[in-house]
Amino acid sequence: MRLIGLAVVLTVSLALSPLAAGGQQGGKSPRIAFLAGGARAADALLIETFWRRMKELGYFEGKNIIAEYRFAEGAPERLQSFAAELVRLKVDVIVAPGSGARVAKKATDTIVSHGVRSQ
C-alpha cells in the first residue's frame, strides 16, 4: 500500500504543480476527485496516506485544494455516471484505484493514465 500511495501522490503532485501556481495568482483552487468501485472504508488507508503526503507538500483539503469523492459502494454500474459527473465538474485530477481507472479513462479523452502496481 505504501508504494501505491507514494506513486499516486507523486503523480498527482506533478499534475497539480502548475495548477497550484496558477491558482495562487488567480484564486482558483485545483480540484481532485477520488473515484472508486467500493466503499470509502475500503480505500481509507489510501486516502489517509494520500492526504498525509499532500499536506507535507503544502496542499490542504478545503484550504488550497478541493476534493470530490465518489464511491460506487460495490455497484460497478454507478462508476460510469460518477466518472461522467466528475468530467462535467472539470476536476483537474482523478485518482481512481482498480476498475475506477478504466471507467474514468473511458469518460474523457483528456485523461492520461498512470498505472501503478503494488509489489
Image (cartoon, rainbow, N blue to C red):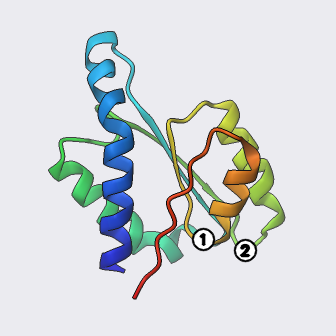
Q: As drawn, is 61 to the left or to the right of 67?
A: left
Label at residue 39: 1
Q: Is residue 75 above or below residue 57?
A: below
- From this view, report whether residue 43 is shown above or below residue 67: below
Q: Residue at x 72, y 74 (%)?
A: 74
Q: CA distance from mark 2 to mark 1?
A: 7 Å
Q: Residues within 10 Å of mark 1 (few under 14, many from 20)?
A: some
Q: Residues within 10 Å of mark 2 (few under 14, many from 20)?
A: few
- The disc, 2 or 1, on the residue closer to the chain's N-terminal end is 1
Mark identifier at residue 74: 2
Classify mark 1: helix, strand or loop.
loop
Amino acid under disc 1: Ala
Residue 13, position as x, y percentages in the image:
31, 47
Label pair 2/1, CB-CB below 8 angstroms = yes
Say which of 62 and 30 sits in front: 30
At a point 21% along the width and 49% down the height, the residue shown is 55
Seen at 38% across and 49% down, the residue is: 12
- In the image, 9 versus 44, the foreground residue is 9
Q: Position of residue 9 (x, y in %)?
A: 33, 57
Would you say 33 lies left or right of 87 here?
left
Residue 59 position within the rendered picture, expressed as x and y whole percent measured from the top left: 25, 41
Image quarter in which the C terminus is found: bottom left
Label 2 secondary element: loop
Residue most extreme to the top: 26
- Up-down relation of residue 50 to residue 26 (above or below): below
Name which quarter of the figure residue 38 lies in.
bottom right
